[in-house]
Amino acid sequence: MYRLLIIFLVLALATMACGINIDLPGTQLETGPLQTDEIIIPAPDDPEQAVDLSLEFGAGELTLNGGAGDNLLEGEASYNVPDFKPEVDTDFPSVGVTQGDLSIEGIPNFEDDVENEWNLLLGETPVSLEIDAGAYRGNYELGGLSLLNLDITDGASEVDLEFSSPNLVEMNNFSYATGASDVTLRGLANANFEDMTFRSGAGNYELNFSGELVRDANVNIESGISTIQIIIPDGVSAVLDFEGGLTNIDAGEGWVEEGDTYTHAGDGPTITINVTMGAGSLELN
């Protein structure tokens, strides 16, 4: 128990450190005229060939939806910092799109006149998708795609992700790691994953398991000082085990508490959730 409390204190200090003012050298970004680049990556000749697709995005706004038709990926990137020009590396079965070759020493000075926005569409090619982002705004609509794996890592961010319709293939693993952020994940049952891991620092997080649950799913949640809302639809079977420190747990209608285990009655496949929190608030709906 003492070891667990020490871990939570370390997480708390790490989280609070984000608010400490430290004098570090900065980098002033030089802006220029707004440029727009078209990104088109054709799908592999074999429609069943799986692709490892990685997107590396720093600061700005990233929007990703389905609808690329016969292409693996298509869309536009608009930016007014020359070093934000996206670079595409295609070496099937691996494909990467990165946000330029910008070298930043210290803390970048992002003024209001800095613009950087990607609007991308994915096709139905089977893909293991990895997104590595910084402090940004993310908008993801991933329903109706063929995601074999999904791995998202970002910093302080504001993200809205949804599977509005079922994933076309079985997803092996969905991993999300974030810093001090505001993240909403909806339609998670439609992702059709076997295992999901969610790790976060301080922030506000909503994990909504709406959609069509067609097989058992395992979810591991690890968070510091945060507010987490977990939503399980009526009629869906779920079991949640909690381990943590100073956390207020509010179990809504449909949940039965027995010690540190919370059960949501339902039929069919079951969502098994393990939650480890340092402190904050956990709301079960």
Image: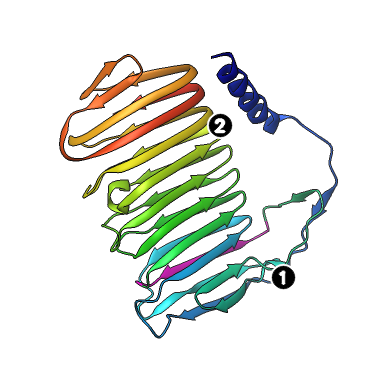
For discs 1 and 2, the disc positioned in front in the rendered view: 2
Task: Please name the amino acid that badge 1 sits on.
Answer: Pro
Q: Is mark 1 on a helix, strand or loop?
A: helix
Residue at which label 1 appears: 82
Q: Quadrant of the C terminus?
A: top left
Taking the spot 52% from the left edge, 33% from the top edge, the residue there is: 203
Percent of width and height locating residue 91? 56, 78
Image check: 40 left or right of 123?
Answer: right
Residue 203 vs residue 87: left or right? left
Rendered residue at 20%/25% (across/down): 254
Q: Quadrant of residue 64?
A: bottom left
> Disc number at residue 162?
none
> Whole-Å distance between the Cαs marked 1 and 2?
33 Å
Tell me where the magenta segment starts and ends, as one range: 113-124
Question: How far across and down, in percent of the image, does residue 25 sit?
Answer: 85, 46
Residue 126 drawn above or below residue 277: below
Q: Which amino acid does label 2 sit on?
A: Ala
- For label 1, the crowd category at 10 Å Cα-Cα, with few meaning under 14, some 14 to 19 and many 20 or more, is some
Q: Where is residue 224 in the image (x, y as percent from the top left)?
A: 55, 28
Q: Mark 2 points at which residue?
A: 202
